[in-house]
Image: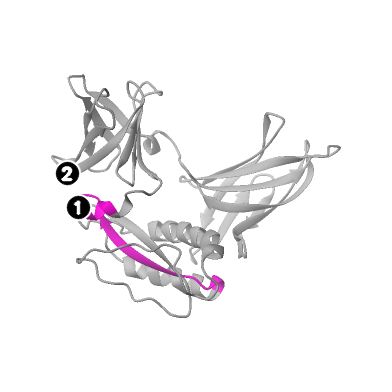
Amino acid sequence: MIAHRTVFRRFLAELVLVVGMLAGCAGADGGDSFSQIQADENVQDIPERQDVPRIVVTYQTYQGSVLTDLDEVADAINEITVPEIGVEVSFRLVDAASPHMATYEGETGVAYLDFVAEDPTSTLTFYHNGRYMDLVSMMVEGSWTMAEGAGGYEYTLTPDSDSDTGAVVAVASDEQTCTYTPEDGEAVSMTNVRASGPAETMTMTGTTPIPGQETQADIKGSLYDDGTVKVVASAFGSEIELDAGTWSMGDDGYTVTFQFDNAGELVSSLGGSGAALQYVAASEMLGDIDAELVIAIAE
């Protein structure tokens, strides 16, 4: 259950970034919404403002477990997005253990649980649309269902092909570990990828000229969930580290402040292309850098 303001600010920031990127897709006349989600009879219709286009965000829960202050989050988002880019955000709750999961069918899968075994090539990924990718013994794709189990959740994996092997996965209530048991096979202990080190939550991308060359170097910044950031440049198959430091989200929920070892303190801004950072620094390899880095949610 979401209970801490820091989680709200992170969630708010990610949604603002997404809304900024999608704003251009919404009708300028405020007519069609970017995404129309069909609700069942248990979900109340969300009133729609007539003067701005709307983006509908489906929010996955398990038996209604993530509900606290969700309306407050939506209000905080709209305080930013309606005046800044003319887009309203609404939520629809979808329970992963109920028939509402049909809402996601046909959508491109977004990974929300990712486990790895002691052998780093053995991985298991669950996608929000009820699909999974199993690389524990071989590559197996299929569909999953979930039920509440003892001390956590029990996922049943059904492969697309009859020649592949299904499995049952017991996931701990904190989702940090799981036990993968294939049909007629031995159990395998696995760990959530996020628990094995800092995870990339947002990225920053841009380019900068290469001195003496008629080409550009790609710049990428990685913002991790432990509050650290790293910036690298790549060209001609080589990569160099430009900077490192820390980052923090502002109280407004979308301004990011960076403390870089090389560039010093820099602050992001929200413009027509969404959130971005004007990265200004000196580099021995690339000279003086003055590049706009567009901020996005890590894939």
Answer with the quarter of the image where residue 11 lies: bottom left
Q: As displayed, is residue 47 above or below residue 158?
A: below
The residue most toward the front is 162
Percent across and percent down for residue 298 are 50, 46
Task: Say what amino acid the circle numbered 2 marks.
Answer: Ala
Residue under label 1, please give it.
98
Counting residues from the start of the chain, the first of labels 2 and 1 encountered is 1
Q: As displayed, is residue 108 above or below residue 1?
A: above
Task: Give the residues in magenta.
Answer: 84-102
Count of labels in the image = 2
Percent across and percent down for residue 141 are 33, 32
Q: Residue at x 30, y 55 (%)?
A: 103
User: Viewed as shown, does residue 254 lie left or right of 183?
Assistant: right
Q: Are marks 2 and 1 in contact (CB under 8 Å)?
A: no
Q: Residue at x 68, y 33 (%)?
A: 240
User: Magenta includes 197?
Assistant: no
The residue most toward the left is 150
The residue nearer to you, when weighing 196 against 181, is 181
Residue under label 2, please give it.
147
